[in-house]
Image (spheres, rainbow, N blue to C red):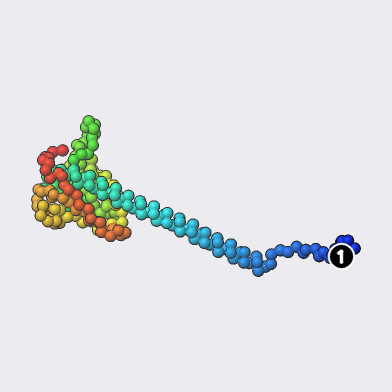
Amino acid sequence: MKITTITHGFLKKTVSFMPKRSQGFTLLEVLIAIAIFSVISMASFSIFETVINSDTATKARTDRINELQRGFLIIERDMLQIARRSVRLNGEAPLSDFLHTDNDSFTSSEQAIAFVRHGWTNPGLLLPRSDMQSVAYQLNENTVERVHFNFVDAVLGEVPKVRPLISQVEKLNFEFYDGKKWQETLQENTLPMAIAIEIDTTDYGIIRRQFIVAGDNLQDNGG
């Protein structure tokens, strides 16, 4: 204790000063601070995790939509250039139809379609092949694949080129429009006015696209 005497005029006054004791945090205050910090940290982590998961889900959906759009764009490109031409497999006689949907004609898949298309770029005929191409679409292990050969008439032992297009597909169906109605079969040696492709996906359900067949008015006998 410090005693100080203050003189004011004829009056004297003694004032006592008590030194302040230094004070720290109590255990309760420390626990409350830790609890508040923990709550803030958990909230921040939850927000961060939500943002990361949202970004991952958005990227996955974007990639999936891009896959579907790219796949159907390739299919449309082929459908618009279908030729009135049959193919010859393994040196045998030409097949009778322009479109082949049975598993004995082109691929090992029962859910498939095969045809010949125009417009396979070959500038100046530099490559020893035609500018026509044998193409097939098939469902293999839940993936729609595009199959093609280097030559229009596949030769014995030639290995086809396979390109995966659309994944997560459970069923693949085709329908053909003859000018009156949609049907699953065609008359021999004819091309439909349009072709519908229907895929049953695990995430978006059934997706159906219809394509006009411009090749119906083309007369092609070679390639």
> Looking at the image, is 178 positioned above or below residue 42?
above
Quadrant location of the N terminus in the rendered image: bottom right
> Looking at the image, is 75 positioned above or below residue 207?
above
Question: From the viewer's perspective, is 123 left or right of 39?
Answer: left
Quadrant location of the C terminus in the rendered image: top left
Give the residue drawn at x 80%, y 63%: 19
Q: Nearer the viewer, residue 213 or 108?
A: 213
**Number of numbered discs present?**
1
Question: From the viewer's perspective, is 195 left or right of 141?
Answer: left
Q: Amino acid at mark 1?
A: Lys
Image spot of residue 153 (x, y percent): 17, 42
Give the residue drawn at x 21%, y 36%: 129
Q: Nearer the viewer, residue 159 or 68?
A: 68
Q: Which residue is mark 1?
A: 13
Give the residue drawn at x 77%, y 63%: 20
Image spot of residue 100 (x, y percent): 16, 50
